[in-house]
Image: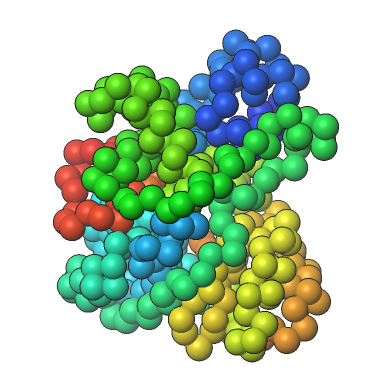
Amino acid sequence: MRQELDEHDLRLIHAVQLAPRAPWTIVGPACGLHPITAARRWQRLVDRGLVSVLVTPGPSLMRQLSPAYLDLECRPGDRAAVIAALRVNPRVASIAIAAAGRSLVLTLMADSPHALADLVIDQIGALPGVLRIELYPITQMYGEGSSWRLDALDRDEIKHLDRRPNPASRPIAVSERHRALFRALSLDARAPAAILAQQLGESASTTTRRLAAMRAAGLISMRCDVTPEAAGWPILVNYLTRVPAGVLESAGRALAALPENRGTFAIAARANLFVSQWLRGMSDIQSAEARMTAAIPAMEVCDRMVTLRTVKRMGRILDADGRSIGVVPLDPWHDSVISRATMADP
């Protein structure tokens, strides 16, 4: 897919990245568009499968969950069937078809170590055709997709939009009501409070208060996702890197600050940092890696994984061009695979 987003599209998407749930009366003027024009342009992008606003676990929820990356090898003839089984599982957040001798790289979200083991051993490992699995449990999040920006707005425009909630004074115990709201937001995180409330069977004011509290407590993050090919960032590379334990925290934060780094996570493996980058071309891989090693001289790059195709990203089902064609609501608390009837068949 060639880049097909014009400058107005990129400015609009950047504005929504900064303020995912802000009304069009705020988003439109901030990027130079009338609110009605902004809303119509956004809906056209949604209808084409190029953008979506979704919810992901925030920092405090990530500490309560058991997230992980999984490197999976399967027989080539069984790969399509394995993907079909994985993409409808609400605890498999993302699926990428990788090069370098791998079949798939998965992002998993489970609510406990026991649930993660059940997911990996009893569900994924038992699929016909799976030959090898290697698990990389995530122990710390330094940067993820909700902080990645297109850089299409200038500094003055950004300051009118980048309004982050004030941190909560105390943690929130996650209840079934919080989990239900998380699942509803997984379908469309820009949905009005009245629509979310109708799905949950409660008042809009209650939903609004709960949503604000969850954001303030760091239970959820809002993320505006864009098809990378259409935005001009078609190359996805994942790195397994290693740094001395004593500099892991500072290295993770330094790597997360690099503009091309879309995700940076500490993992419990021989390699202790997992880094994900979006790049404009294959020729940028070496220079991007050089910037990482220049920022962290003690870092060793253990492995590189170039993504050939992403078939699922944070619950969104993608076609061969990276367009969203369906959604399986992300649900770390789910205990079984859901019906295929809830998603479009690519």
Q: Residue at x 64, y 50 (%)?
A: 148
Residue 186 in the image: x percent, y percent? 37, 41
Q: Residue at x 41, y 56 (%)?
A: 61
Is residue 31 placed above or below 81 in the rendered structure? above
Q: Residue at x 47, y 84 (%)?
A: 269
Residue 212 in the image: x percent, y percent? 46, 36
| 8 and 249: which is toward the camera | 249
Residue 58 in the image: x percent, y percent? 47, 52
Evaluate whether residue 65 shows in this view: yes
Is residue 52 placed above or below 74 in the rendered structure? above
Residue 43 in the image: x percent, y percent? 51, 22
Evaluate whether residue 87 shows in this view: no
Is residue 78 placed above or below 243 in the rendered structure? above
Quadrant housing residue 327: top left
Q: Where is the N terminus found, in terms of image quarters? A: top right
Q: Residue at x 60, y 87 (%)?
A: 245
Query: By what rule are the colours in the image chosen?
Result: rainbow
Q: Where is the C terminus found, in terms of image quarters? A: top left
